[in-house]
Image (cartoon, rainbow, N blue to C red):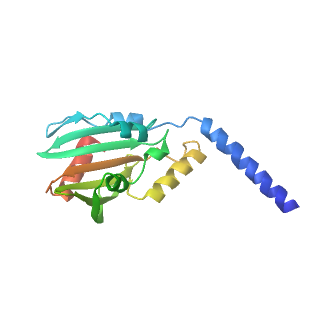
Amino acid sequence: MRHRTFIWFGLIAAIVLGVLWDFYPLANSEDRLRLVRANGSNFSSQDLPLTRTEQSVFANAKVIHRRYQFEGHRVFVTLVDGTENRHAVHDPGYCFQGAGWKVVDQTTITVPGGRAKRFKAVRKTETMVVMYWFSDGCKRHASFPRYWWQTTLRRITLGRSGPEPVLVVLQAPNEKADWPILIPKMIDALSL
């Protein structure tokens, strides 16, 4: 009997704490997203509107969606802050597969401050190179379990465990860029 009481007490406490955490406003990464540069000496960009589907998926999330011309390469950049909608942050490979692309040639690459995932997506005669990582402004990683742990810990500690990780997605259609050289330049120039 004592064991059941303890379980019920724990369940009620978890529910109450969950409700309280939902009402505690956490600082988002909006200030960091504002620092992402749109233009510079060797690049320019154009903000892109979100499709209806993207608007639905990214509801309440802070999103930057731009097309950059960076040192002669066309790169689409999407940044997602999921502070107010964690469901908006998901593996880009799933989106590509859902849109009819075949994801091939997945690998992990080193970027300044950590690691990123890189894959190629192929559909008919089109090819897209996609790279993504999570960034807290200094450290970068491409692990979704680590992202979920960071955001859960952040909610439990009411934001004291650190800043919200932002999902950074780069897409380059039919590009033959030297990514190991280009990515560090982009991270530095755009403040990714």
Number of residue marks: 0
Up-down relation of residue 173 to residue 50 (above or below): below
The one of 158 and 171 positioned closer to us in this rendering: 171
Residue 58 visible to the viewer: no
Q: Quadrant of the N terminus?
A: bottom right
The one of 143 and 120 positioned closer to us in this rendering: 120
**Residue 44 coordinates in the image, percent (x, y):** 17, 36
**Residue 118 coordinates in the image, percent (x, y):** 28, 59
The residue lying at 56 percent from left, 34 percent from top is 25
The one of 31 and 11 positioned closer to us in this rendering: 11
The one of 102 and 15 positioned closer to us in this rendering: 102
**Is 84 on the left or on the right of 63, as rendered?**
right
Res. 94 image quadrant: bottom left
**Residue 148 coordinates in the image, percent (x, y):** 50, 53
Residue furthest left as drawn = 72
Residue 175 visible to the viewer: yes
Up-down relation of residue 40 to residue 134 (above or below): above
**Residue 181 coordinates in the image, percent (x, y):** 18, 56
Q: Quadrant of the C terminus?
A: top left
Up-down relation of residue 46 to residue 121 (above or below): above
**Is 178 on the left or on the right of 149, as rendered?**
left
